Amino acid sequence: MKARDTGRETRRRLTGTVLLSLFVLSTGIAIIALAVLIMDTASDGAPWLSWHLLTSFPSRDPKQAGLRSALLGSIWIAALTGAICFPLGVGSAIYLHEYAPKNRLTSFINLNIFNLSGVPSILYGLLGLGLFVDLLALGRSIIAGALTMALLVLPMVIVASREALVTVPEGRRFGAYALGASQWQVVRRVVLPEALPGILTGTVLAMSRAIGEAAPMIAISALLYVTFDPTSPLDRFTVLPIQIFNWVSRPQAAFAGLAAAGIIVLLVLLLAMNAAAIIIRDRYQKRVRE
Amino acid sequence: MSSLTIETKALSVWFGRNHAVRNISLGIPANRITAIIGPSGCGKSTLLRCFNRMNDLIPTARVEGVVLLNGENIYESDVDPTEVRRRVGMVFQKPNPFPKSVYENAAFGPRLNGIGSESELNSIVRRSLEAAALWDEVKDRLDDSAIGLSGGQQQRLCIARALAVDPEVILMDEPCSALDPQATAKIEQLMTELARSYTVVVVTHNMQQAARVSNYTAFMYLGEMVEFGLTDEIFENPKNELTENYITGRFG
Amino acid sequence: MASPESRARSLRKHHKERLSERTIRQALFLSAILSIVVLIAIFVTIAYQAIEFFKQVSIVEFLTGTRWTPLFQPQHFGVLPLVAGTLWVSAIALSTAVPIGLGAAVFLSQYAPSRVRRVVKPILEILAGIPTVVYGYFALTFVTPLLMRFFPTVTVFNALSAGLVMGIMIVPMVSSLSEDAMIAVPDLLREGAYALGAKRHEVATRVVVPTALSGIVASIILSMSRAVGETMIVSIAMGSTPRLTLNPLEGMQAMTAYITQISLGEIPFGTLEYSTIFAVGITLFAIVFLVNLVAYWFTRRYSELYSGL
């Protein structure tokens, strides 16, 4: 059957080509935007990268300024956030998947977790401000910041944990029950060990999200200029995104370069954490495939 | 006539509105192998799961009637199901070893019961693996993953795991249906060994297996116990026409 | 053989074991309830302080006033300039993200071979994972100067630049949610269209997209709520002067940017100025809540129409 050569056929084919080009173009724009963003930032920031950058405190003189306090603050926040949201998120997921009866309260809780992930991060900042900083009198401290971030990334940990729990085959639970295990024993000794890599991956990803968030930390910390090492969770702090924001907001061109360098450090940190998460996940896939 | 380890009286199971097990009164003799046979869907697995209260784990299941374990009703309200399951062990159709080492699989049950000392665990693990005719094949590989064993070895490991908690009864739900003929033969041989020390109940859809291995046979059809008796009598001289039809292959 | 000790163990429940199982269950339940508690806490905390604000400023003035100058004398508390700023930047962001995101989604789900998908999808995921402060930097230092070359009236801070970059940030969200919706369209429908002699682009535009429409619209609405709540891009690149204007080439202030600005200003707790961030916050909460509600209602209503599949 030869293709008909009418005008209509040609129009159809032409439309097809045009549309395909548009679709490819859209995809291309997204990729090009990412490439431009990375190249521009890297070229702006590369000249400012140095060991000095990582170990010095911020300063009014661009040549002296560094990320030390911000880097330490980010590490503190990431660690504490992980420590807080890990038990809470895993506990929620265990309850929802292993214990909860299929009633309206359970569906409501599940729906709510979805809602929570849509709340703007700045509003979590206001929650932290009103509740942790003010009401619980924790001050504008690292612990207030970490508690706030833990609430923000909690839905991520819950969802990732739940998915990990689902991958444990039902037969294993039955096998354990048949040996006379109680429900908690089945969860603790059979389900959790197998689901743990997936849960850890989710937690590491949540921590990496916590590192990149600026808005809630600005509301809690309110400090742009930190020139000391935080030594306890009750200390005031700043984090990498805030420091970058600070530098971007200064009119001098040199600070723009510093900001770009800070971005590079932040992105490298994020890359490392995501890579760690992927490694955990891949090790897990390999074990299960045996 | 040997004594009865398990006795049921008017036992019924519903899944929602489906009356899966109908009013069964049955006695399982001690230290013998009892086979439960019948066409697919006749309720034999459901009946088996009543003996160790595994049906409790299915939300839509409802159980009525009495199941006596050595004279005690396991369905009484203050009975702890996990305690029942320590006394009545189960092996499943599809081998389900935990993704842990061979040793840890066998030690799982004893650890649950609080046995922590290494020497005690070592001897229990060894005894159970020997009783399951698996020791010689895995004694140098105790720390290897159980998932790496062959299907037949995995199933024997599951049997060893069940033996390690020191049960009285071993329930087997079509234990050989996922295995090749050689592995099946090994397990059938094992069943006969086990009956010396335990009471064994086997659900199987393989009539020849039932005829080969068991001392007593129960034939179920559509949730009801049609006939029960010595295996030889059931297969050579069935009293019920339904039984005869099933055994001669006219249906099922 | 079951040992005499084993036989002698009672079948009855041990009281201690029952207790600890129950305690564990309750503890786990509490952590699950946490998510509901958090949502309520967000609302209550913000509302509490917002009420302090509304004790001193009338709601009418807040919702209808066109000047927002809480830090200057004379003080004006009309929130419309902030809302307008937020809406402007969100509108520009959506106008950018929807065509690009949809186009990419159609390409990935209907055309792209798996080799291409394997490369493109991770790239989009990277786009989604970049912190917004990086996008803000990009908007201020790259996009704005670029725009200035083409539109001389563009000021250093402007809504267009922020909106465009925010659009790029949102593209992965539109694209992956729409792609999921399109993939969910049963192969049976697509094959039926091909069997009638349709070409690939016709199957995509006349069968797949209309069938997946509810999911696509939901993804757009959800992206809108993301745009409305975004903070760093608008704080860095859009401006800190509230301005009610129809010109996106000028600087404006978004609601979230205002909250950032005040948070950094070391305003003492308990003052009227401090409570303004909560008043703005609760307005933001209300907008996002409404948008999510619409998205939810929309998915429920339209997915029923097509569930006959």
Image: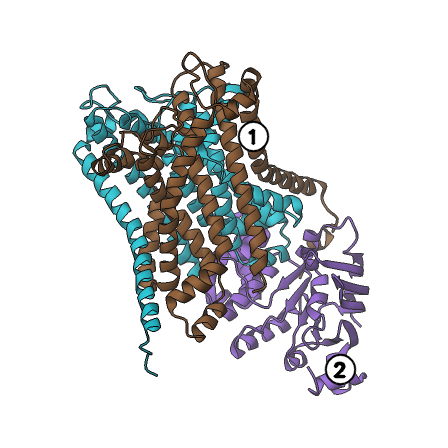
What's the residue type where badge 2 is placed? Answer: Ile
Quadrant in which the C terminus of chain B appears: bottom right
Q: Disc 2 marks which residue?
A: B234
Q: Is residue B240 left or right of residue A212?
A: right
Question: Front-most of C98 and C128?
Answer: C98
The percent position of residue B173, horizontal first and vertical second, equals 64, 68
Depicted C30 relative to depicted B78: above or below: above
Q: Are marks 1 and 2 in contact (CB under 8 Å)?
A: no
Q: Colour of chain A?
A: cyan
Question: Front-most of A60 and A37?
Answer: A37
The percent position of residue A40, horizontal first and vertical second, equals 22, 40
What's the residue type where badge 1 is placed? Answer: Phe
The percent position of residue A219, horizontal first and vertical second, equals 42, 25
Task: Give the residue drawn at x 36%, y 32%.
Answer: C234
Q: Disc 1 marks which residue?
A: C43
Q: Which type of secondary structure does the marked residue at label 2 adopt?
A: helix
Chain letter of mark 2 equals: B
Dividing the picture into quarters, in which one does residue A62 lie? top left
Distance Cα–Cα, label 1 vs label 2: 72 Å
Q: Which type of secondary structure does the marked residue at label 1 adopt?
A: helix
Task: Give the residue drawn at x 45%, y 75%.
Answer: C196
